[in-house]
Amino acid sequence: MVTHSENGKVLNARLALEALRNGVPNREAVKILGCNQPRAERLFEEMLSKAEDSENSPSNAQGMMVSGDFGTGKSHLLAHLENQALSRGFVCSTVAISKETPLYDLAKVFKSAMDNGRMPGRIGRLIEELGQSLDPESEEYQNFFIWADNTKSNQLHQIFPASLLVHRKSFYDFERNSEIENFWAGDKIYVRTVKTGLREIGQFKNYPFRAPKVRDLPPQRLRFMTELIKSAGYKGWVILLDEIELIGQYSLLQRGRSYAELSRWMGRVVGEEYPGLVVVGTVTADFAAEVISPSGSKMDRDKIGARLEQGSRYRHLAPPAEEGMKLLELGCISLNPPTEEDISVTMEKLRSVYSTAYGWEAHALATQPRGAGYQNRMRYRIRAAVNEWDLCRLYPDHMPDTEMQEYRSNYEENPDLERGSKD
């Protein structure tokens, strides 16, 4: 008789394999296969430890950039770091830079981080779970409210402390509190919603304000949410930015804005404080040489500053954009290529998972050295192995011969990424 526990193992094994077939490791696959990037893991642990130290935590965000070729395990590393962060009591969000979440648009990246956030031990929507976790009687919450109310120091618009007070005092007005929580998470809100709440609790005169400017809200939301997360009893907020190389397909101005935003995320902008925020980004290994270097195809090093300084609107972004380019050129941690021993160990783990998933004894695979080319990258080796076992299981009399083709990053400007954007 098959037990419930055995069924669970089979399901987890199949879920892990399906993710690996698609080249997108899920949490189960990462747990099974592990990670072998000690330098990145060590630096990440150090950043978490600093963020946990509430008295001595760095005032700005902490960040690191990781570079590697396609298939070398960047997304796998992020999934592993997410597991580490959750196990240590951090809220964690993974954001894939895409057409819908362009790096130059902080509002959209923040919204994606909220929509894709995870909390230790909870499975609901991040902002709703955080709202339920707030305890107005706790010392953390009271300190948070005092901080939020001091808008001269924290540079928040008054709608933030006002909405926090209404949220606290209108505990049973679920519809209003849901609107307020959604505003914190990046949605719009009618100012009258907050002002009506202030009138009801006799605080209208204490919070005189007009509607905030939409363009001013994203960095304020990021600051406010990081503090709210800590006030709910969590250590901080970890945000993982995947596929930053997509900015190579943006227009020149959008790339400049993206470099400036990267500086913000990596904690390199003077005067912007996000204590408790830890950020890790991934980028392809050849991005800086192809896009930023004066000898590359786009020569951003020579062009970005002049483009940003053409008008007054983006002139202030020139210094952080310069810092962002410098970080991508000189500040990335390169992923370690897998050794033959790493590959051998991984293949044996994978063989065990496959055998469990289908009740079929997967045969051992030859792991002869394949040099330093793309065929030796872990993603290619894993997908080739799963493909071979699939064919042998389904067609026992067939001996497959897998051919691989290298994926190359495309840094050509994509007009689709510019549609709907406002430069």
Image: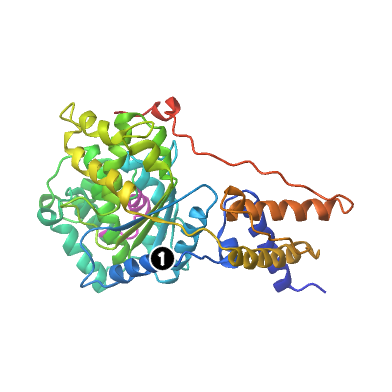
The residue that appears at 38% across and 27% down in the rendered structure is 420
Examine the rendered structure and indicate whether residue 294 appears above or below residue 332. Answer: above
Task: Answer few, some or many: residues within 10 Å of disc 1's Cα (few below 14, many 20 plus, some between 14 and 19).
Answer: few
Work out whether residue 234 can be spotted: no
For residue 33, above or below residue 69 = below
Residue 9 occupies quadrant: bottom right
Name the residue located 69 percent from the left edge and 65 percent from the top edge. 353
Seen in the picture, residue 74 relative to 321 is either above or below; the reply is: below
Determine the secondary structure under disc 1: helix
Any magenta on residue 181?
Answer: yes
Query: What secondary structure characterizes most of the magenta part?
Result: helix
Q: Is residue 368 rendered magenta in the image?
A: no
Residue 7 position in % (x across, y down): 73, 68
Residue 165 is situated, as x and y percent measured from the top left of the image, at: 22, 58
Residue 57 image offset from top left, x and y in percent: 23, 68
Residue type of the residue flagged with mark 1? Arg
Residue 209: tell me if it is visible: yes
The residues colored magenta run: 169-182
Quadrant in which the C terminus is drawn: top left
Give the residue pinned by disc 1.
39
Quarter of the image that includes the N terminus: bottom right
Residue lying farthest right?
A: 397
Q: In the image shown, does 213 or 382 lie closer to the viewer?
A: 382
Q: Residue at x 39, y 69 (%)?
A: 42
